[in-house]
Image: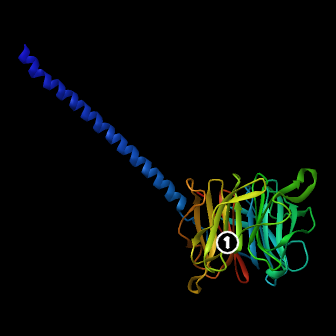
């Protein structure tokens, strides 16, 4: 009996060890598959986020230059530009139809004098903010704005009803305006009156429900300097996240961006980051998903034109945007300059100048 027990004991141990090995191998396989799945998911998210959008073939919609564009979530597009002969501003209303736009007629923007560099924004209620520089040169540049209203669900044949006169903002040039659905207004601009650097203002419409349509600047009486550079463009989403891009004058062909958040009239900017070594005149749009749509010109004479890229706000580093490669929007538009871009979350629309014409292209947001 003793000898039989002695003989059977090793067999029991062997069974236990065998079961343990099978258990360990099964779990190791499960953990391996789980790890592969996580890696695949991370790679697929990163790849999708870094893909360049597919832009529609460009189409000519008017004559002029210095275009700016805004788009409402309804699909109504507002575009403003300067005439080919300068000093006068005009606008179009359009409606997105997939990756094309049905445009209404060109209409005159108000104001007098040497108007330059128009830029426009639309609130969710349909209030229009029109900003421009009075003066042909930076050293005499002064910024003004007007507020009007359109029906965001109306047609392209309507006109803006203007609710204010021309109102001064600050000495400045090459401005860029953005507004989100919380009513936060951001303005970035080059200094005017012989100054240097880039400045911003933050504010909101004073009391449109009560018939007061002026902008109340929460950032204070004067612009706040945030960097050195030229050609700034600022974007804002409904989470109060901010992306600003600009050209560095001392470096000529280098583009920089800054991420930030806005609160209480202050933009809390992170550090400046270079993202292109051969670019100029950047324009950016920022979606609630954290997707950034960017257009710019390239600088070397052999290959100018309008280029596009996308980026995503890094969740782990508040300073960083993870960018895709840039690609030319259209081979036919090799001399396009001064791009603008806007998005309503479903589509992005870009516009630019090929003297003396104005062109646009639309991309679907995945």
Q: In this orientation, which residue lies closer to the viewer: 38 or 216?
A: 216
Query: Looking at the picture, how far across and down is residue 21, in whole percent?
Result: 24, 35
Residue at 62% x, 73% y: name it. 255
Residue drawn where x is 37% and y is 44% of the image: 33
Whether residue 98 is visible to the viewer of this picture, yes or no, is: no
**Residue 64: percent from left, percent from top:** 77, 79
Residue annotated with mark 1: 246
Report whether residue 31 is seen. Answer: yes
Q: How is the image coloured?
A: rainbow
* Callout count: 1
The quarter of the picture where residue 111 lies is: bottom right
Please indicate whether residue 52 sits to the left or right of residue 102 in the image: left
Front residue of 45/101: it is 45
The outermost residue toward the bottom is 301
Q: Residue at x 87, y 62 (%)?
A: 148
Q: Residue 93's image quarter?
A: bottom right
Q: Position of residue 347 (x, y in %)?
A: 65, 60
Q: Is residue 218 left or right of residue 30?
A: right
| Above or below for 224 versus 336 | above
Residue 247, x across and y down, in percent: 66, 75
Q: Residues within 10 Å of mark 1 (few under 14, many from 20)?
A: many
Residue sitting at x 51%, y 54%: 45
Q: Quadrant of the N terminus?
A: top left
Locate residue 227: give its quadrant: bottom right
Which quadrant would the C terminus be assigned to in this image? bottom right
């Amino acid at each position: 009996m003793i000898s039989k027990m002695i003989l059977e004991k090793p067999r029991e141990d062997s069974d236990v060890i065998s079961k343990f090995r099978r258990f360990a191998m099964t779990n190791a396989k499960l953990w391996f598959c789980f790890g592969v799945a996580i890696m695949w998911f991370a790679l697929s998210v990163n790849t999708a986020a870094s893909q360049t959008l597919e832009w529609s073939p460009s189409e000519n919609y008017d004559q002029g230059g210095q275009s700016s564009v805004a788009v409402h979530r309804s699909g109504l597009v507002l575009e403003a530009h300067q005439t080919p002969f300068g000093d006068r501003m005009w606008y179009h209303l359009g409606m997105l139809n997939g990756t094309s736009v049905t445009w209404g007629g060109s209409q005159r923007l108000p104001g007098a004098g040497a108007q330059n560099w128009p830029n426009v924004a639309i609130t969710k209620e349909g209030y229009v903010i029109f900003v421009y520089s009075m003066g042909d040169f930076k050293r005499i540049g002064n910024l003004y704005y007007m507020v009007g209203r359109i029906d965001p669900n109306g047609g392209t044949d309507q006109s803006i009803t203007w609710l204010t006169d021309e109102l001064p903002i600050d000495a400045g040039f090459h401005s860029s305006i953005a507004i989100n659905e919380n009513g936060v207004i951001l303005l970035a601009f080059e200094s005017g009156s012989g100054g240097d650097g880039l400045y911003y203002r933050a504010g909101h419409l004073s009391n449109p429900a009560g018939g007061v349509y002026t902008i109340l600047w929460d950032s204070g009486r004067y612009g706040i300097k945030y960097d050195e550079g030229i050609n700034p463009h600022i974007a804002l989403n409904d989470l109060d996240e901010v992306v600003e891009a600009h050209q560095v004058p001392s470096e000529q062909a280098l583009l920089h961006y800054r991420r930030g958040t806005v609160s209480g009239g202050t933009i809390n900017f992170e550090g400046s980051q270079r993202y292109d070594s051969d670019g100029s005149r950047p324009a950016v749009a920022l979606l609630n998903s954290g997707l950034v749509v960017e257009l710019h010109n390239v600088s070397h004479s052999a290959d100018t034109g309008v280029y596009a890229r996308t980026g995503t706000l890094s969740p782990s580093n508040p300073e960083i945007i993870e960018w895709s490669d840039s690609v030319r929007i259209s081979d036919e538009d090799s001399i396009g300059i001064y791009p603008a871009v806007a998005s309503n979350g479903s589509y992005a629309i870009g516009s630019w100048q090929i003297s003396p014409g104005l062109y646009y292209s639309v991309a679907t947001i995945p």
